Amino acid sequence: MRASGIFLHPTSLPSPYGIGDLSSSALVWIDLLSSNQQQFWQFCPLGPTGYGDSPYQTFCSFAGNTLLISPDELVKDGLLSKADLKSYPKLSDDHVEFGPVITEKEKVLRKAFGKFTDTNEFIDFCNKENWWLADYALFRVIKKLHKERPWWEWENVYKLRDAGALESIINEHGQELRYQKFIQYLFFKQWGKVRAYAKQKNVLIIGDIPFYTAYDSSDTWAQPSEFLFDAEARPISVAGVPPDYFSETGQLWGNPLYRWDTMRENGYSWWRSRIQKTLELVDYIRIDHFRAFDSYWAVPASSATAVNGEWRKGPGLHFFQTIKEALGELPFIAEDLGDITPDVTKLREDINAPGMKILQFAFDANPANPYLPYNITKDSVTYTGTHDNDTSQSWFSLLEEPYKKLICDYLNCTEKNFMDAFLRCAMGSASWLCIIPMQDILGLGTGHRMNTPGVMFGNWQWRLTKAMPAKKKMERFAELTKIYGRAPGSGHCL
């Protein structure tokens, strides 16, 4: 019962519009996976990104990233003509230039909106999704009226959701509200086609839920009682992690914390809706920062770093039991990296969720290192690295010589063929599932990293180009998939 797959965020797909999208290139990608023995496709959250372009800091936990909408698909649907796209500028193929992409995609979507007449499908979508869509549309419209400033900088009538003020927005800006709903409709319609194609090709999709949500989001604005705010809607404490592998001063994320007592009383309704919505889009959910369900790092909102925080108890097993009662068995993968205690491990085991094993973390000369392949257990997912790591080739090239020698001795390889041996090591692990970032399949080095934690700008930009030997490398990876018993036919289990 073994399987494997590839990590590639949709923004990294090839397309002529400066960013990967939900066009035929997504279907070609699924074909590439399927024809090369891969049963899983994993990526980051699909929500609308804001400041810093991070998919882990989205404007809404339920909305889709409309930058992924394919202009070519809009032409097929009759909402654009080919002439409408002639003015679209030539943007980079090898990285996402978010500023120009945001500007140009907005122009294209506005053109499509100008040609759109409400359909029964659109009306049904708006009615079905109204429970989150109405607030999200209001949030985006009011945000635009305030020159995109965060909601806590709005006038009090908007910030604190005065009913009369919101009614005025609805009456005066009906078309803008309809536009926001329209582009969400397009996203979910296009994603639905991609999801259906993946199912047809027997490719399962692993999505992602960040533990926290962004402060500047419709979630926090629409339901402030669920978050640890003061009377002026300011966070009392914020999220982060203490010093770790990635940072000597920890990571100060700044996300607001939850009022777990309030959430417990309402049966975790916001979280239940969030998980249910995500499962409409994907087959499995990777829970980012899983350890916070057991205990989380709370930092005073005034702090400049994450050093001076404290551990607080999370909702624990009661949360998962409550969600399971409402939704049934939950196909979770737990991101259990960092400072993990026995209580976190027990919680993960109690809910039957596999954890993550990162091969880049394995080689510190400690034979008890839990990431070493001979210490890895079946109830896990092995990765060479994650979206937060450097590419494996770059990581290896920057190591000091004693560590390079340690790794080469372990893998029985030379520096020249390190990458092939590293992939073999990952695929041969006991984990039921192995996921490899596409950059590692290609053996890419410096300059191809997806994200550097703690660095605000320049992340999330990497793209797969048509010039890269993806087909050849995937065919070689398919051979490894067969060799290590991960080809289709072995089945799946959690």
Image (cartoon, rainbow, N blue to C red):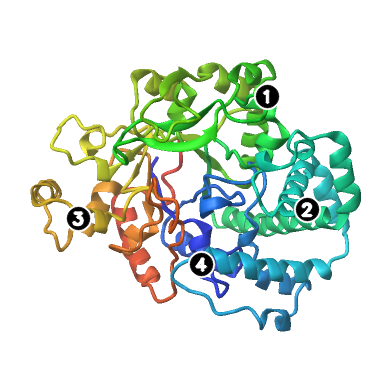
Q: Earlier in the sequence, mark 1 or mark 2?
A: 2
Q: Earlier in the sequence, mark 1 or mark 4?
A: 4
Mark 2 Cα within 10 Å, few/some/many (few <14, many 20+)?
Answer: many
Q: Earlier in the sequence, mark 3 or mark 4?
A: 4
The x, y position of residue 83, in whole percent, is: 72, 84
Q: Residue at x 44, y 75 (%)?
A: 466
The x, y position of residue 433, in whole percent, is: 39, 43
- Decide: is 56 above or below 99: above
- Decide: is 36 above or below 405: below
Circle 2 sits on which residue?
181
Task: Tell me if 171 is positioned left or right of 178 in this view.
Answer: right
| Front: mark 3 or 1 | 1
Q: Secondary structure at mark 1?
A: loop
The answer to whether mark 1 and mark 4 are in CB contact below 8 A is: no
Q: Is residue 350 visible?
A: yes
Circle 3 sits on which residue?
398
The answer to whether mark 3 and mark 4 are in CB contact below 8 A is: no
Q: Earlier in the sequence, mark 2 or mark 4?
A: 4
